[in-house]
Amino acid sequence: MNKFDDREKSFEKKFAHDEELKFKVSARRNKYIGEWVSKELGYNSDQEKEYIQSVIKADFEEAGDEDVFRKIKKDLENKSISEEEIRKKMNELNEKAKSDFS
């Protein structure tokens, strides 16, 4: 029975580690997205910091990335950036964030 308990604890630790890593990657990606959109909108450094926080907060509205996507799309509606370009940039920055933790 002890081997099963050890195995269960091991799986629980791995799950907790994986979830923590997902959270960190998502938060880092949101930071990168906030930086990118801030540059597109011509924000200064104070505005950029505030905007990054708003992107991070937007990610807590619902599970997944659609809440962040909707925010960015709305914020960039006066720019000529397509939904496809936004999604591509989000994927690119997600990969960059993943590599930060590799």
Image (tube, helix red, strand yellow):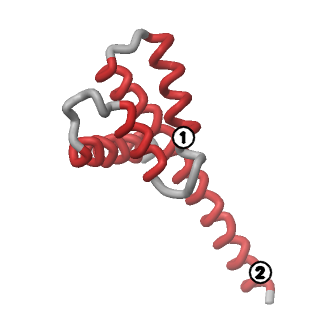
Label drawn at residue 5: 2
Residue at the farthest bottom position: 1
First in residue order: circle 1 vs circle 2: 2
Quarter of the image where the N terminus is located: bottom right
Q: Nearer the viewer, residue 34 or 98?
A: 34
- Secondary structure under the numbered disc 2 in the rendered image: helix
Where in the figure is residue 89, as x and y percent of width and height?
A: 28, 41
Where in the figure is residue 10, as x and y percent of width and height?
A: 67, 71
Q: Nearer the viewer, residue 81 or 102?
A: 81
Give the class, few, some or many, for how many residues have Cα within 10 Å of label 1's Cα (few <14, many ≥20): some
Q: Is residue 82 left or right of residue 29?
A: left
- Secondary structure under the numbered disc 1 in the rendered image: helix
Identity, as a three-letter code, of the amino acid under mark 2: Asp
Q: Nearer the viewer, residue 81 or 91?
A: 81
Instruction: Name which residue lies at 59% across and 46% down.
Output: 60
Identity, as a three-letter code, of the amino acid under mark 1: Ala
Where in the figure is residue 84, as x and y percent of width and height?
A: 22, 48
Where in the figure is residue 92, as x and y percent of width and height?
A: 28, 44
Q: CA distance from mark 1 to mark 2?
A: 39 Å
Instruction: Name which residue lies at 50% across and 35% down.
Output: 55
Residue ID for mark 1: 58
Instruction: Name which residue lies at 80% across and 84% down.
Output: 2
Label drawn at residue 87: none
Residue 6 found in image quarter: bottom right
Q: Is 4 above or below relative to 57?
A: below
Instruction: Name which residue lies at 56% across and 59% down.
Output: 18
How many numbered dots are placed on residues in this image? 2
